[in-house]
Image (spheres, rainbow, N blue to C red):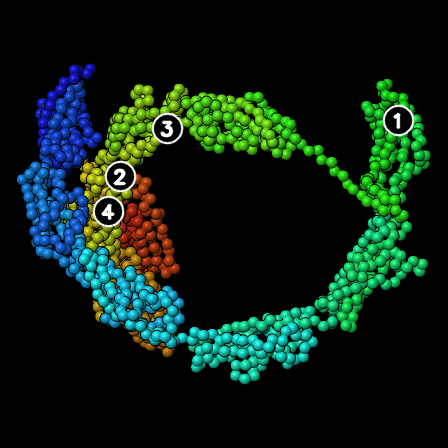
Amino acid sequence: GGRGPLQLSQLSYSVLEEVDKGSVVGNLAKDLNIELKDLEYRDLRVLPGHSKNYFGVDLKTGALYVGERIDREELCPGLIKCSLNVEAMLSNPVHLHRLEVNVVDINDNAPFFRENLRILNISESSSSGERYLLPMAKDTDTGSNSIKSYRLSQNEHFSLDVQSGDDQGVSADLVLQKALDREKQSVINLVITAFDGGKPNKSGTLKIHVNIIDFNDNTPIFSQTLYKAQVNENAPPQTSILTIYASDLDEGINGEVAYSFIERGDFNPGQLFSINSQTGEITVKGKLDFEKNSAYDIRIQAKDEGMPSRSVHGKVLVEIIDVNDNIPETIITSLMSPVKENAQLGTVVALVTVTDKDGGRNGLTHCKILGSVPFKLKLNYKNYYSLIVDGPLDREHASEYSVTIIASDEGSPPLSSTSVIVVHVSDVNDNAPRFPDPVISVYVKENSPAGATIYTISAVDPDTDDNAKVSYTLLGIVSKSTPISSVVTINSVTGDIVSQQSFNFEEVKTFQIKVKATDYGVPPLSSNVTVNLFILDENDNSPGILAPYSEHGSVNSENIPYSAEAGYFVAKIRAVDADSGYNALLSYHISEPKGTNLFRIGTSTGEIRTKRRMSDNDLKTHPLVVLSVINLVLTAFDGGKPHKSGTLKIVVNIMDVNDNTPIFSQTLYKAQVNENAPPQTSILTISASDLDEGINGEVVYSFIERGNFNPEQLFSMNSQTGEITVKGELDFEKNPAYDIRVHARDKGMPSRSVHGKVLLEVIDVNDNIPEIIITSLMSPVKEDAQLGTVVARVTLNDKDGGSNGLTNGKILGSVPFKLKLNYNNYYSLIVDGPLDRENASEYSVTIIASDEGSPPLSSTSVIAVHVSDVNDNAPRFPDPVISVYVKENSPAGATIYTISAVDPDTDDNAKVSYTLLGIVSKSTPISSVVTINSVTGEIVSQQSFNFEEVKTFQIKVKATDEGVPPLSSNVTVNVFILDENDNSPGILAPYSEHGSVNSENIPYSAEVGYFVAKIRAVDADSGYNALLSFHISEPKGTNLFRIGTSTGEIRTKRRMSDNDLKTHPLVVLVCDNGEPSLTATVSIDVVVVENTGDLQTQLRHVPLKEDSFSTLNLYLLIAIASVSVIFLLSLISLIAVKCHRTDNSFSRYSAPMITTHPDGSWSYSKSTQQYDVCFSSDTLKSDVVVFPPQFPPVDGELIIAFKYFVYMSLSDFLSSKKPFNGANVYIVVYTLKTL
């Protein structure tokens, strides 16, 4: 139907704060006169008027209930009346009803103080009765629940004065009752407690820390009445002697003590000693001398800093300790220096005297030489020594020795001093002059002028003075006709070898001389050296042109055809040079008329060839000039005979003057730069060139300030490179372009400069990212929220303008929310898909806002939307059916299993409680068998179970959560009792009589394997606990019998012998397979008889005729027929049941297996069941052993197999027509009982 007109009305309710969620406030349906059946159609709901949904409506009952925790103090802080205004809305038609819910205060808040600790500072001189203001406590509750009284903790100094009645409420003052003494108690800790008027009342506390401020009422006290100390004489200044100490019980400046000396008579301690006024440390100040004064009596004073101050006097006795404070003194007399290097051993060099001003042992001295020197000290008398030569001397090796003499006394500790004597060694002529090499090579340029020094020879003599002076002479001749003096001479003092002529390399290339060096010693010593002189070639010969072009000054002619190709051979120029080496290495160059460029010449070969083909424009005759180039040196010759020459290299440098102005590479420079470009961003580089060189060509760049615009505020220029970079902040909106004037100036004197222009355009960039503003976030959102529910308001804002300021918003990723555009940049975040708290309890909704700038900028904001839980999940068990296995005989009260169900909801919706359902049987309630802990799920047995009585039972457990409304689920628990080995095997007839000895006869002629007897036993347990084994014990050394471990058949192992006993007592032990194993025994005497007649006689006691068909046989046939009928009916029932079973039920059991054992027994096994059927060819000895299944049900196949075995056994018995005995009867009876 359509929406009717909107109608309004108002209702009032009251509710206590802090009531539980779900508490009913009132019947809204009744108050609005709405039928309960119409609530869902009218869609009655409460619209939230706050950030929380405090109220909801139950559409089944129409009750207005509390949906969220209501805290009056949070909603209406400080107000007497508190109410919540919400709206109830009805649809079809639409009605709005305003609801006023008055929140009634309860005493749920304790009083509190705004501070946890208040510190008070009170002087110990304060008088009793003084008052101190305390802070007031606050209580957010109102009325009778507000603060009513205060209480002070127990103490002996303070009391509390409580005041009430004013508008500010109840207050309290702290009052001093007893005088304070800081030295006894410096701090008092109190606790004031504020109580409200609620029932029961609540309280809050404040700790009061009272600091007792000190008053100077105590005099300092020295730690000792007399201080004693010792100090060494000659102790250096600042040496610590002792530290005095005085304590003052006061604190602060009242307890701070200052120390000082007291001057008494003529003695002022401050002349020799110093005292630290703060620490009391006494140190040495002057020079202490034990010989002058051996002790000092010093008076001291300690005074506090209080007002007025208090002081005390004390005494210090300082004892001076004598020390060994004079070092030995070494005196050198009669020093003989220098000493000749050939001095004999024992030669006296000096006299040494050692003295010490100290007395006693401190004045006794010893003397010795340190290190290794060719000298030693020889004691003459007491402290008098001689320094004598003790080894060979060599002046050339060591011209002087520093002899270190150490003198030490015998003081404690000993003192020592050192003295160094410098002994010089004089020379004797014991070394001849030495040349550096035995042969010396000297190189002389040809054409060098006569009289030039061609080499300076030198010999070294390690001696000194005249012994080291060397003179030089020449030895030998150049040739027989040429004396050495006509070629070279030598300066006897300097060793300069001087040429006596100019040498020509082309005539003489080398010659040899000898030089002798002699010293001036007595006697003189000498040595010789050989000198090889090599003449070096100079470029003193011009190249000579060889024939046919050698005629000087003539013009030579060569003909070439007009059709000559490029590379055509024209001529070959040959030249030689009389010099050698590089001076004779020639190169060829060609010169032809300008513009021709027709020929080329090989620089090393001299071959002239054409470079190209001839043309009509070429001359008919081509004059060529060929140069043979060499390095030339300008030489000046004199007019002497022979003449001499000298050379000079001339370099002409052209000096620059500053005659050029710098020129910019462009008349106008243009560049662009982005706004907000960071500092140091390079914009462009201007360049100006200057043709001058040096500093005249070095250009410096700078800005020119024009009007109010100073470019240096925004830009920076490198004065050397001309690079312009960003310096300040550029903003396109403030200025889109800048006209900058630049200046280029050289460094010449005077300098020259030029002006230029730079136009910088500022490029607008999208430099503001969109801003995302989240408002009115509703979180958490219930997981059953409808599509379109508004979660939050989103506003996008971009400071840029134009397309840079246009924004778009979208959500990243896949979330059940979407953005809905309201207007321009205003969006709503709404629910766009189903919410499931169990799948996702929180969503991080990433909103990306991007503008339309180029490149676009974007920003992201993440809204965390929490999803609150509703009870939409029932508890879940891990499996629909749980199997529990319990050992029989386990004690009552034991936990047999802990069941657990999981509820994916949270809080109360996830809290699970457990209960038991159903009964064990009509007469047995479930509570008498097991109970369950409703919280933990522990299933506890209430009795001890017996497997032989109860093998299994079934219970159901219900798990219920605490949600509104609650949800639950059930699970089936199958409890299986596990068998314990608590029953011993039982021996069956005819050997079952306890304690009796049974007897069996066998013939003497019995073969190996002769059947003696069969022991039958049963075990009330099941499974392996009922699996029996048989063991035999016979007299030692007999070894005549054996028993089947599974059949119990006793047979012979060998034939009889004459040595065997006539009677063989046997003990048969029957063991089960349990843990621990239980046993039973039976005794049998086996009697050996001579013939088989005695054996047959034993069987005649059976009162039945072998061939007769007795009444018992008739009964037996009737029983078999009845059993067969029952078997057929059971088989049909089992087939019907199995047709309804699921595949899973069949999979629990495996296929049956029938196994034949060597001893003649059959084993039928299926899953955990095992039935053993044991029989032999002798029907009298046959038996059936049954191991019943541990767990039901019994399959039809098992019954078929088992009955088949029984049928075959009985058929064999009937066909044998043998009489019954006890064993036969037992077979039938046990078979019927089992079936």
Q: Can you give x and y, in whole percent of width and height, for residue 123 in the image?
A: 15, 53
Mark 4 or 1: in front is 1
Q: Residues within 10 Å of mark 3 (few under 14, many from 20)?
A: some
Q: Secondary structure at mark 1?
A: loop
Mark 4 or 2: in front is 2
The amino acid at mark 1 is Pro
Image quarter in which the N terminus is found? top left
The amino acid at mark 3 is Ile
Residue 923 vs 249, above or below: the answer is above
Q: Residues within 10 Å of mark 4 (few under 14, many from 20)?
A: some
| Residue 1165 located left or right of residue 645 | left
Mark 2 or 1: in front is 1
- CA gap between label 2 and label 3 equals 33 Å
Which residue in the structure is indicated by mark 1?
Answer: 623
The amino acid at mark 4 is Ile
Q: Nearer the viewer, residue 868 or 1008?
A: 868
- State the residue at coordinates (74%, 38%): 651
Residue 640 vs 380, above or below: the answer is above
> Which label's residue is closer to the chain start, 3 or 4?
3
Which residue in the structure is indicated by mark 2?
Answer: 904
Q: Secondary structure at mark 2?
A: loop
The amino acid at mark 2 is Pro
- State the residue at coordinates (32%, 56%): 1172
**Furthest residue in direction left, as rendered:** 165
Which residue in the structure is indicated by mark 4?
Answer: 899
- CA gap between label 4 and label 1 equals 127 Å
- CA gap between label 3 and label 1 equals 90 Å
Q: Are marks 4 and 2 in contact (CB under 8 Å)?
A: no
